[in-house]
Every structure is written in structure tokens, then in C-alpha cells.
Image (spheres, rainbow, N blue to C red):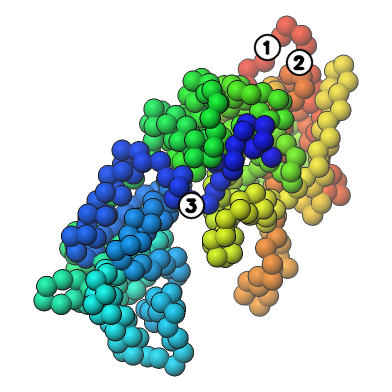
Amino acid sequence: MFLDFYGLCEQPFGVTPDPAYLYLSRTHSQALTALLSGIQADRGFMALIAESGMGKTTLLYRLIEELRDTARTVFLFQTQCDSREFFCYVLSELGIETTGLDLASMHKKLNDVLFAEMLAGKRFVLVVDEAQDLDASVLETIRLLSDYETTHSKLLEIVLAGQPLLAKKLARPALSQLRQRIAVLSRLERLDAGETACYIEHRLKVAGYSGDALFTPEALAVIAKQSQGIPRKINNICFNAMVLGEARKERTISADIAREACASQMISGELAREPRAEITVDNSLRAAGRPAAAAPSTDDALLELAREINDRIACRAYELFESSGFTHGHDREDWLRAESEILVNVSVDITETETELTVRAEAPGFDQKDIEVRVAPRSLCIMAQRHDPSDQQEGKVVYSERRAAQIFRLLELPSEINPDHATATVSDGLVVIKLSKLPLGKEVPVLAKTAAA
């Protein structure tokens, strides 16, 4: 990759929640301090709310690191469960066999552990991530855990972390007793432009970078705008930018590279300028010879779709990281596997004459009703989603393996074309798009319309 080219010891913009890379923005710092203070003051219940991609899990890992010498911690991710399964997960993390135990017995086992830790002079902290997925009954079970206490102190500190849906659940009247027990409530907010620049600098420094500024101020401004201050999106853009910069032998990441990186992905070890995204298409194609849809611009709707797939791939890559027992060093492999599970790798060929561009894309298994094509003067996007009826058996979904069923290819065109003179045909999985080149010196506005391909 680009590590040697930029003088890095490790990948600075990975998708794994490594606490060494936590950047303490204003709200991240406040949240970490509040949680630590709440635990040290035996406040009982605490909550951390953050939208997806804000570094919530990374902050929780840092919290656990800070507590390493003073507390025993259990970190749970399995939140789609009932109350008994929840107890099984907790006790399993403690190395306690639960086979054959009823809820009362599991309560006693946990109580014994809590008293043992108290006698050893340590707190016991239960951290539940993705708590927005917990059923109300499980949340009520967690509330009852606060009954583990002596007359002088709490035996158990509980941190519930989740996306904004968690806050909505806690606001329900049925969970009022749990809500009233939450003594510390922290939220993570998006990074502003200045924090985004500091975030990037911090991660580069942790990864061993020691040279001059790697990203120009203009590039940092582009990244701050396109990422919307969400750390996961910043990571994806910076990773793509450094891949692109290394491919072009550019020691400094310019604004142009940053802009292109917003629509770029690393595919199977090769630089691909076409980012991909899972989307829901309108299934209407599209008789042969009909005009292709004119895209608003590659900087608007299409880049938003690319950002969506980045988030989906990052989430799946994290699942793979979790399933491997949080073994570091496989960031790239997890990302590529996640990408291959979500997206179909489509081969594209572009030929050019004096008056016309012809784009051929191989999309085996997709037909006219699945595929949508959008064009702009200097770009083209091919999108598709396949619904395979073979996955259905007697009304039940059968998951034998993950199989990619989406296409998202965003191509930069070598010449400017007229979006109104574009046609697309599909035959035997081959998409053929004819584009009329724009005569030199003539401008054609980009039309924001939704005609079918």
C-alpha cells in the first residue's frame, strides 16, 4: 500500500476501533471525562449517544483502557437477544459456564463475582455497545442489575452506548425507571473544520508520519465538507486520497486528489476511480434506445450514494473484525471481503471516436429491469440491484452465504458529452451505453431529471 511511500509505520485510517487513534475533540473529551468521573463516583448508570461513524466504540475502548488497573470490565456487542441470553453473554465473558442454569442461578453467579471484585478493591463495569438494538424487556433486566449494591456502594457500574434511537427508547414511558437512574448522559457531536484537520493530523502522527503537512489546507477543507465531520467518513476519504496520491507519486494530497478520493475506492488491490454503493433503484428500464437519465452532478447525489456504501462496507468490515476476536493487522483484508460481499465487481471498457463514446459494462445476472444509468457531462454512473428469488424457500429466507447483489460504478469520462443524447441497452448481462460527444466550445447544462435509461 502507501505506507512506505508516505513514511508510515501503519495504516492511519483503518476501520477498526483502535483506542490509540482516538482523537479527543471537544465532545469526545467531555464524554470520556464524564464517563470516567461517573464510574469513579459510583453513579451506577451512564449513557453515551452518538450517530453511526462518530467513534463511539473507539472511545469505549479507551474508557476500558483507562479502567484497566482499577476495574474489571465486560464489553458486550451482542444486543439482539432476550434476557436469558443477555445474562449468558455476561457470564460467558467472565468465563462462567451457563449450560443448564436458570435466570435465578445466573443472578447468583454474577452476584458472587461482584462481591469478589469488591473485596479485591476493584469496581465492576459493564459496557453495552449498540444498546439501541436491545428489546425493552432486556433494558428492564439491565435496570434491575442496579439492585446489586451494598448499603455503602454500587457493585456494578453500567454504560449503555448507542445511536440516537437509544435516546428515543429511553424516553418511552415504559422505561421511565431506567431513564431516571441514568446519572451521566453524554453525546458525541460531529467535528468542525478545525477539528477535522486536527483529527487527520493526530491519526497520521500516531501512525508514525513525521514529514511536512501531508494534506494541503484546501484538501482539508474538501474533506471536512464532504465527510460532514463524521470520523468514519473522514477515514474513508483520507484512505482513498492516500491510495490515489501514491498511485500518482504525489507527496502532498491536494484538493483535486481529495475531491476525487470522495468518489474512489480500493478494489482488489487496484486503484478504481469509480466508488460503489448499495442503493435502492427504481426498477423501470428501460427499453433499448431510450435516453439515459441525466445526473445532477458527481458532487451531489452520486457522491452521497458513494458515501452510503462506504458506511455499509465499514460496518460489515467491523463485523468481520469483531468475529475474528478483534485481531489487529487485517484492516485491508476485512475491508476487501466486506466490499466483495456487498458489491458485484463489474468490468468496464470505454472506447472513443471523434463523435462518440461507447461504454460497455459486464453485469452478468442483471437484466433491464434491474439496471439504471445516469449521465453528466463528464461522468457516468451505472447502478443495479438484483433480487434473487432462489433465496426464498417456503416463505423463509435461507442464508447459505453472503452474495453481492448490487452494482455502483461511477466513471469519469475522457471527453465531455451531451447528457440528452445518451442511450443504453442491456443484452445477456452486457450494458452498452452510447454517448454523443459535445462539440468543442459548446456548453450543455446538466439536467436534474429522472428519465429512465
Q: Position of residue 112 (x, y in %)?
A: 29, 84
Type of residue at label 2?
Leu
Badge 1: residue crowd in 10 Å (few <14, some 14–19, many ≥20): few
Q: Position of residue 22 (x, y in %)?
A: 42, 45
Distance in Å between CA atoms under marks 3 and 1: 47 Å
Instruction: Please name which of the two marks, 3 or 1, marks the residue nearer to the observer.
Output: 3
Type of residue at label 1?
Glu
* Residue 438 image label: 2
- Decide: marks 1, 2 in contact (CB < 8 A)? yes
Residue at horizontal 53 percent and vertical 52 percent from the top: 16
Count of labels in the image: 3
Q: Which residue is mark 3?
A: 17
Q: Position of residue 336 (x, y in %)?
A: 67, 51
* Residue 252 image label: none
Name the residue nearer the viewer: 273 or 29: 29
Type of residue at label 3?
Pro
Of pointers 2 and 3, the one earlier in the residue sequence: 3
Q: Secondary structure at mark 1?
A: loop
Of pointers 3 and 1, the one earlier in the residue sequence: 3
Distance in Å between CA atoms under marks 2 and 3: 48 Å
Q: Which residue is mark 1?
A: 443
Report which quarter residue 39 is drawn in.
bottom left
Distance in Å between CA atoms under marks 1 and 2: 8 Å
Q: Position of residue 53 (x, y in %)?
A: 46, 47
Of pointers 1 and 2, the one earlier in the residue sequence: 2
Residue at horizontal 33 percent and vertical 62 percent from the top: 69
Q: Quadrant of the N terminus?
A: top right
